[in-house]
Image: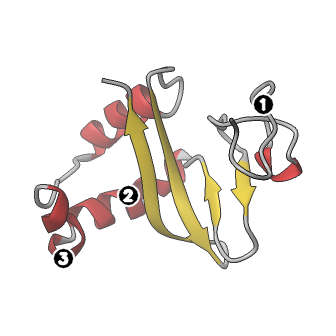
Amino acid sequence: MAPQGISPGKRGDASTGASALPLPVGHRLDSGVVSLRVPTLDDLGFISWMWSDRETMDPVGGPVTLSPEDGARWYTRWIEPGSPDRAYWLVTSGGRPVGEISFSWL
């Protein structure tokens, strides 16, 4: 069963209720307070900053340092073109990234 407000169907803009996750690059899911969106290459700076923050990352194994090359490889693996066995979204509020949600099938 799809989450409330998300209709099963082709990939696309979930904010219209016309499709199911995962969302392709350039699309987002809005709740009014926060939004989920697939990151662009321009978001690698925020992702790198967030992953290097000790307070944020200690609960999940500790900080991760991404070089620009590592960031580009990660983006290719997870986002564009990505893979059907994993998904990653930025959580935004007021148009600014504030967190992340991700999963991968084992």
Q: Reply above or below: 33 against 7.
A: below
7 sits left or right of 97 in the view: right
Q: Quadrant of residue 30?
A: bottom right
Image mark count: 3
Residue lying at 78% horizontally and 31% vertically, measured from the top left: 8
Name the spot of residue 57 as percent of width and height, x first.
20, 64
The amino acid type of the residue labelled 2 equals Ile
For the residue pair 17 and 84, the one nearer the viewer reads as 17
Q: As rendered, which of 47 and 55 lies closer to the eye?
A: 55
- The amino acid marked with disc number 1 is Pro
Q: Is residue 18 left or right of residue 4?
A: right
Quadrant of residue 34 within the rendered picture: bottom right
Q: Residue at x 52, y 49 (%)?
A: 89
Q: Secondary structure at mark 2?
A: helix
Q: Residues within 10 Å of mark 3 (few under 14, many from 20)?
A: few
Quadrant for the C terminus in the image = top left
Give whichever of discs 2 and 1 has the lower sequence position.
1
Judged by depth in the image, the label closer to the viewer, 3 or 1, is 1
Q: With respect to residue 8, does 93 lie above or below?
A: below
Give the residue pinned by disc 2. 47
- Tell me which numbered mark, 3 or 1, is placed earlier along the sequence: 1
- Say if mark 3 contacts mark 2, CB within 8 Å: no
Q: Dot 1 corresponds to which residue?
A: 8
Mark 3 or mark 2: which comes first in sequence? 2
Can you give x and y, in whole percent of width and height, for residue 25 in the image?
65, 38
Question: Which disc, if any, is residue 62?
Answer: none
Residue under numbered circle 3: 55
* Secondary-structure class at tag 1: loop
User: Residue at horizontal 17%, vertical 54%?
Assistant: 65
What is the quadrant of the N terminus in the image? top right
- Work out how far the residue at label 3 is from the one at label 1, CA to CA, in angstroms: 37 Å
Residue 17, horizontal then vertical, whole percent: 85, 46
